[in-house]
Amino acid sequence: MNKNNEETNVSNDEIVERDYLSAVIEQEEALVYYEIENIYKDNKKKEYKNKLKLKKDPPVLTIKDNHDNEVFFLLTEKMTDELIDSLKEVKKAYLGFSGPSDIYKPKELKEKIEYYVKKNFLKIFLPILVIIIVLLF
């Protein structure tokens, strides 16, 4: 849906121009441009700034359209991680997944196992119980 809550069909998006960290995309009645700046030490060599310099002066994501709308975002490390996760969910929806990933799932293996056991107690222990009963009788 667009900002007027009307359904739109933008499946015919066309990439008009593309560079390393920018693109112009034609969407229905608008041209959308995005660009990420301030990530390279030297734009000609395309060498990234080091981590400390990025933290002090983060990259900037600029999104513009041909209707003079423009927005800027500082791409801090946490903002970048959140955007990546969110955009991965959008991609999964386009790929036909049935629902979103569990954002509360821990990252460490031991914590993941504990989390899964707590969340799926019956799925794990009911088959074990059935196997034990079958083996005893």
Image (cartoon, rainbow, N blue to C red):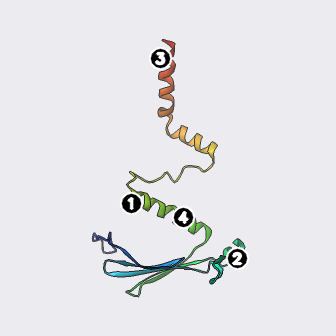
Question: Dot 1, crowdedness within 10 Å: few (<14), some or many (≥20)?
Answer: few
Q: Which residue is mark 1?
A: 94
Q: Position of residue 37 (x, y in %)?
A: 57, 81
Q: Where in the figure is residue 35, as x and y percent of width and height?
A: 51, 80
Nearer to us in this view, 38 or 76: 38
The amino acid type, in three-letter code, at marker 1 is Tyr
Marks 1 and 3, how far apart at CA: 44 Å
Q: Report x, y in % for residue 69.
A: 42, 84
Give the labeled residue for mark 3: 134
How far is the residue under mark 3 from the one under mark 4?
Answer: 48 Å
Residues marked 1 and 2 touching at CB (< 8 Å): no
137 left or right of 74 in image: left
Alpha carbon separation for disc pair 2 and 3: 63 Å
Q: CA distance from mark 4 to mark 2?
A: 21 Å
Amino acid type at image mark 4 = Glu
Task: Identify the residue shown where x is 52% and y is 19%.
Answer: 132
State which tag comes first along the sequence, 3 or 4.
Answer: 4
Q: Nearer the viewer, mark 1 or mark 2?
A: 1
Q: Which mark is residue 82?
A: 4
Q: Earlier in the sequence, mark 4 or mark 1?
A: 4
The Cα atoms of the two marked residues, 1 and 2, are separated by: 36 Å
**Mark 4 → mark 1, Cα distance in angstroms:** 19 Å
Q: Please tell me whether mark 3 sits on a helix, a strand or a loop.
A: helix
- Picture quarter with the N terminus: bottom left
**Does label 2 or label 3 sit earlier along the sequence?**
2
Mark 3 vs mark 4, foreground winner is 3
Q: Amino acid at mark 2?
A: Lys
Which residue position holds label 2?
A: 53
